Image (cartoon, grey):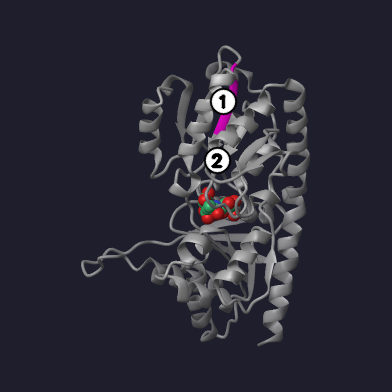
Amino acid sequence: MKIGIVCYPTYGGSGVVATEIGLGLARRGHEVHFITYKRPARLNSFSANVYLHEVSSFDYPLFEYTPYETALASKMVDVVKYEGLDILHVHYAIPHAAVAYMAKQILKTHGINIPVVTTLHGTDITLVGSNTSFFPVAEFSINESDGVTTVSKQLKKQTEETFNVKTDIKVIYNFIDFHRFRKTDKDHFKKAIAPDGEKIMVHVSNFRKVKRVEDVIHVFAKVQEAIPCKLMLIGDGPERQKMEELCREVGLCSEIRFLGKQDAVEELLAVADIFILPSANESFGLAALEAMACEVPVVSSNIGGIPEVNIDGVTGYLCNVGDVDDMAQKAISILENDEVHQKFRTAAFEHAKTFDINNILPIYEDYYNDVIEKVKTYV
Ligand code: GMT
């Protein structure tokens, strides 16, 4: 198949998932064309069957805001037409599903009916799409997509509750590539971060408000009173400066490392003992799954799709949003006993296996084929 993938190229989860789907499908023999405004973060080496089409911006004195959507639609039309794509898979409703609608209508005038699959990732519904500034466009473009997927059952439910959805939504979970995410021996890292054998707590996110990174710091402050511990904060974003200030306030700067954006997250997860994900909203929690694949138990909030990934009392614990006392107590209960810790590590790894990329990619392939057939039937 010739597949076009439209996504955000930044470090966000939707871009990561979109890139990994594309790379995985290319390994399975498909021709994959990424259409983005810059190289996606995880598209960092040459892969046969993979092509990148950058959407160029065009500055003009009249534009206070460069009309990116118009440039993207034009690029999509161009790539579909000249590369002969079979399907377009767009990630994140705003603006990608809306732009795909425009590209589809233009292509119809060229005699091409391109099937469009939209994958909803979470904040495109819960924060952006449901906002009055975007609501009608989000609802319309979801209904106009030939296929719609969500990354968890909970996000499907939320989408159906938020919009008047006329399309049947298919749930296809986020996934993990075990060639990359697995526990490896990184003892030298462990010694550098925790020289006296302290436990290592970790959090990975894009430091947006919804991630509640302040809760991670408060949980850590409580845990390190009971157990010698270090905290690694991986990622960057709008809340980073405030979080650095909070570390100074609680007097724990020497115990907390801000590592910024990291490409090889798996090497850091390999030395972690526990992962904290206290989000106020989370459609799936890919970061938690990546930790579990590296045998790291997860203490998280019980919101959104997280309970579909982190099984309470098995792979970690689920706590109410903002309940840092409970999160700290649950983290201590895992860390204070080596046998218990190992039991959670093993269970986290075993459950992560159900999200193996090799199980999920065929589901996308079958879905693409169904959508292509459906579009042919309705021509
Ligand atoms: O919040 C992020 O980490 C970024 C965001 C995105 O859309 O780029 O991630 C969302 O999509 C991920 C991949 O499907 C999910 O695993 C995340 O749970 C989801 N984030 C939220 O719902 C807050």
Look at the image and give the residue range highlighted in magenta. Answer: 198-202
Q: Secondary structure at mark 1?
A: helix
Q: Position of residue 139 (x, y in %)?
A: 52, 75
- Mark 2 or mark 1: which is in front? 2
Q: Which residue is mark 2?
A: 323
**Magenta region, main secondary structure:** strand
Residue 120, given in percent of the width and then of the height, sits at 58, 63
- Residue 8 at x, y percent in the picture: 49, 56
Vertical side of 321 occupied by 109: above or below: below
The three-letter code of the residue at mark 2 reads Asp
Picture residue at 36% right of the left edge, 37% below the top? 242
Disc 1 marks a residue whose amino acid type is Val
* Horizontal side of residue 272 vs 311, given as left or right: left
Depth check: give the residue in front, 283 or 141. Answer: 283
Q: Report the residue marked by disc 1.
A: 223
| SS at circle 2 | loop
In the rendered view, tell whether residue 76 sits above or below residue 224: below
